[in-house]
Image (cartoon, grey):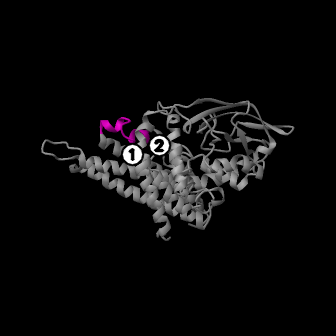
Amino acid sequence: MDFTISDTMKAVLELVNEFVDKELIPMEHEFRNKDFRDLLPELAKKREMVKKMELWGPNIPKELGGMGLDLMDHALVSEALGRSPLGHYVFGCQAPDAGNIEILHLHGTEEQKKEYLSPLARGEIRSCFAMTEVDMPGSNPVMLETTAVKDGDYYVINGHKWYTTAADGAKFAICMAVTNPEAPQYLQASMIIVPTDTPGFNLVRNIPVMGHAGSDYFSHGEILFQNCRVPKKNLLGQEGQGFVIAQERLGPGRIHHCMRWLGICSRAFDMMCRRANERKITPDGKTLASRQIVQQWVADSAAEIQAARLMTLYAAWCMETVGHKEARDDVSMIKYVVANTMQRVVDRALQVHGGLGMTDDTVLAFFYRHERAARIYDGADEVHKAALATRILKRYRDGAK
């Protein structure tokens, strides 16, 4: 594995980091204390700045107006953007739109690409991904109660979804629903494009996460599909291929998530070290940095971030060189290793900030609230560990390591 970063990417990362520092981090106080919708006009200006700098859509194909970066280069950009909660949104590579762009590009019809993909890639509209269900285990994506029953030239969708990120204000949803209940388990579900103004698509609420419901892009919706009729032409890909398409979406998505989490680690680590050196704790001017326990937190965090980063870059390299299937062990490992690393680093940074860390005067409380879910979504830690161990043990039983 070659760790060399090209001169072009070095220049890109320098520009991205400078933009985050000068244009986005200064906006975070407003972000933490205002309704997100109030920020949209100013954020639209920032997005236009990014487009003029030709940094829009790092992972979006060039023919759609993006940078067309490969997985490794996009991972590095994602890390830089992760230092601010606003980074990915302003650069047009935020979830779930990034994943929806990928699958529409790969599996959409020409009509679907014109109506949904092109404006989504340009950042003119937003989308959401309705998969997780209230009464079904999110850790087992083939267990779905939502159904899409054929009725002439239409599908009639009924079901109850939640944690549909960014549903508030989205133009359309990509819904996972059972279309072929008699088929084998992994061939029962399909993906269907559902415009959010379709009768029967009901945004029940934005779910409060640790007391914060959010709005617009920064929200998680509870959705009720009630006899929601959409044309059969809205089927994305082939019928019964929903799970297969979802796996294509989730593999690169986990790399993106992990690199974003490492960006959060970088920001929290920076804040922790600065605070430790500045915070006086004795009359003679000694600071928190003089305490061995704080020194241990700094050392542990530095080592853990470095280890998690190298693991993630290796997993991304494996995905690009040997494919998703062969890289699945590495992807499983980074999912829980990086999520836990981030949680520990943010917690230590918050502890060093003391009472200040508990307030919304810094970004740490936001990270602490909203990133705890990293150990749950895209497969809970325990599921990834069990799946990884099962595959490893099977190889040993079969006589191959």
| Position in image of residue 317 (x %, y %) | 54, 65
Q: Tell me residue 179's x, y (percent).
A: 77, 42
Residue nearer the viewer, 182 or 110: 110
The furthest residue to the right: 152
Residue that appears at 39% across and 56% down: 304
Quarter occupied by the C terminus: bottom right
Mark 2 → mark 1, Cα distance in angstroms: 9 Å
Residue 114, relative to residue 130: is it above or below?
below
- Amino acid at circle 2: Glu
The amino acid on which the numbered mark 1 sits, given as a three-letter code, is Val
Q: Which residue is mark 1?
A: 346
| Residue 366 location, quadrant | top left
Which disc, if any, is residue 371? 2
Please tell me whether the stretch drawn in magenta is mainly helix, strand or loop: helix
Q: Residues within 10 Å of mark 2 (few under 14, many from 20)?
A: some
Residue 81 image offset from top left, x and y in percent:
47, 52
Residue at the far left in the pictured view: 284
Neighbourhood count class around disc 1 (C-alpha, 10 Å): few under 14, some 14–19, many 20 upward: many
Q: Are marks 2 and 1 in contact (CB under 8 Å)?
A: yes
Residue 274 percent coordinates (x, y): 29, 49
Give the residues drawn in magenta, as a range.
Answer: 354-368
